[in-house]
Amino acid sequence: METRTHHELSFTEGMEMLLQAEKDDRSDKRFERLQKSAHFRYQASIQELHMETSRGLDKSLVANLATGDYIAKGEAVLVSGSTGTGKSFFASALGHHACSQR
């Protein structure tokens, strides 16, 4: 009631604002819970990946994985490569992205 009065909102507008805030809060808490339980090695994101051809990353494959379709299909993702090529960072970035999508 106080927020509605302060912002001069109708009952419907105030309720929409309240429901949107609740939805956002639940989404944020779910992301934090998923991220914490995953125990990612790195705080990484898809945007931070260096896509040089020398690293052997296929841009279209990464873009496809970023959609998260493999999760809905129940498919596994296998990341392989030599020591120090960024496999753990890539897996962490993919995992963080998946947490934010679901």
Image (cartoon, rainbow, N blue to C red):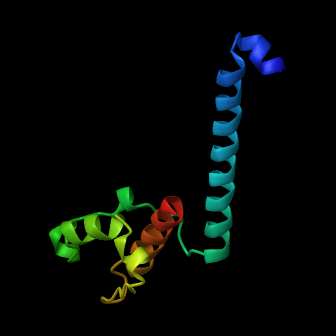
* Residue lying at 83% horizontally and 18% vertically, measured from the top left: 2
Residue 21 appears at what percent x and percent y? 67, 38
- Residue 12 lies, with reference to residue 52, above or below; the image says above
Q: Quadrant of residue 49?
A: bottom left
Nearer to the camera, 50 or 34: 34
Residue 76, by quadrant, is: bottom left
In the image: residue 58, left or right of residue 9: left
Most distant residue in the left direction: 53
Image position, residue 81 (x, y; %): 30, 88
Q: Residue at x 78, y 12 (%)?
A: 5
| Vertical placement of residue 100 versus 85, above or below | above
* Residue 34 spot, x, y in % from top left: 63, 68
Residue at x-position 72% and y-position 20%: 11
60 over 48 or under it: above or below: below
Percent x, y for residue 62? 28, 69
Apparent side of residue 75 relative to residue 21 in the rendered image (left or right): left
Locate the N terminus and report the quarter of the image it occupies: top right
Left or right, 66 with respect to 93, comes to left
The number of callouts visible is 0
Q: Which residue sits furthest front?
A: 12
For the residue pair 28 and 1, the one nearer the viewer reads as 1
